[in-house]
Image (cartoon, grey):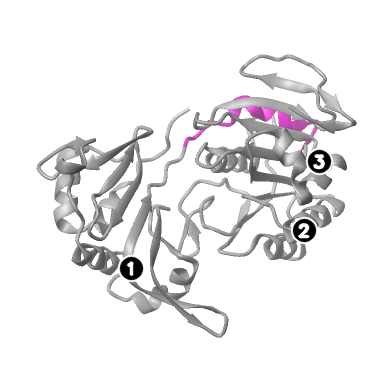
Amino acid sequence: MDKGRDNTGQVLQVLPVAIRKRFTEVFKDLSDVQEIRLRAGRPLIIIYGKCEYFLGINSGLTHSIEKAYYVSASELREAMDYISNYSRYAFEEELRQGYITIQGGHRIGVAGKILWENGRVKNMGNISFMNIRVAHQATGCSEKIMQYIRHGNGIYNTLLISPPRCGKTTLLRDMIRILSNGDGYNRGFTVGVVDERSELGACYKGCPQNDLGCRSDVLDGCPKAEGMMMLVRSMAPEIIAVDEIGSNKDASAVNYVMNCGIHVIATVHGLDMGEIRNKPVLGSLVKEQAFKRYILLEAGKIGKVSHIFDERGVVLYRQGCIVPERIVTDGVVSA
């Protein structure tokens, strides 16, 4: 497994000049940087190597807030000029969603004064908070689990379960790439990707910046339920991949897609199977055994698969071991 191509240079280009200079002194590249948080009048925070640091006012990184570099409001404005190419009007639609995706697939979340009109967000002004999420591709990270979701010439409907920031989107992205490309032993599938938050393909001007394989079609920025229905009607996918389902509309769309004979790979926030089983919407899908595979990621460990269950509650995989073991309560999968 590798981290894929280094496309982090685009991040430096949107940083204010004074901050950019400090970054180039501290980092040779941004391969281990996950987030850069800029807040007006507050210290600059970096999530680096799974740990949080302040950017030092003189040099390097520090855990001391007294030695931290404080971001000015003018630097936030400077960063927004770089991000929007000095034309915020052109990015008005993205700002309504609270983030902008730049070249390289890096997603920049913003917060500030919301301009509300006719019951919807019209625009955002006085942007004083910024979260730059540096895009990384962990190419090959899903290879070891692919055997558990394939069967014959097809795949099982699969649900990935994970707490926030534990790598489920990264894992799903790599699964899409592998299934789309195929290999010498398994054919490639036509995969429809609903990328509501631009995190899977990280499209820039309509083109995915992340590698989703040669047979994937992407609906970028489209609501999940509507996107799944659109793909069924327009792109004849064999598999639909979608990140973070949870609403009634999402569940209805998933059910419709499966009834059309199309397989689904989806993710959901959750700590364990018990939590998913007790969710009003997803619980019904679990009881109906709509998904045939459940992949549970371990809390606090990015990309670490803890368990893989089948629809009956048999543990197919547990921390690297093949251990068939039935754990079913009243016919419902539990952990």
Q: Which residue is mark 1?
A: 127
Is residue 162 visible in this depiction of the protein? yes
Which comes sooner in the sequence, label 1 or label 2?
A: 1
Which residue occupies the foreground of this view, 297 or 263? 297
How far apart are the two marked residues, 1 and 3, measured between alpha carbons? 42 Å
What's the residue at 65%, 44% (across, down)? 267
Relative horizontal placement of residue 69, taking residue 100 as reference (left or right): left
Q: What residue span does the magenta drawing correspond to?
A: 138-155
**Image quadrant containing the C terminus:** top right
Q: Mark 3 or mark 2: which comes first in sequence?
A: 2
Horizontal and vertical percent for residue 89?
A: 37, 79
Left of 119 or right of it: where is 31? Answer: left
Q: Nearer the viewer, mark 3 or mark 2?
A: 3
- Which secondary structure lies at badge 3? helix
Q: Earlier in the sequence, mark 1 or mark 3?
A: 1
Observer-side mark, 1 or 2, equals: 1
Examine the rendered structure and indicate whether residue 20 appears above or below residue 176: below
Which residue was labeled with disc 3? 286
Image quadrant assignment for residue 292: top right
Identify the amino acid type marked 3: Val
Q: Amino acid at mark 1?
A: Ile
Callout 2 environment at 10 Å: few (<14), some (14 to 19), or many (20+)? some
Residue 260 lies, with reference to residue 119, above or below; the image says above
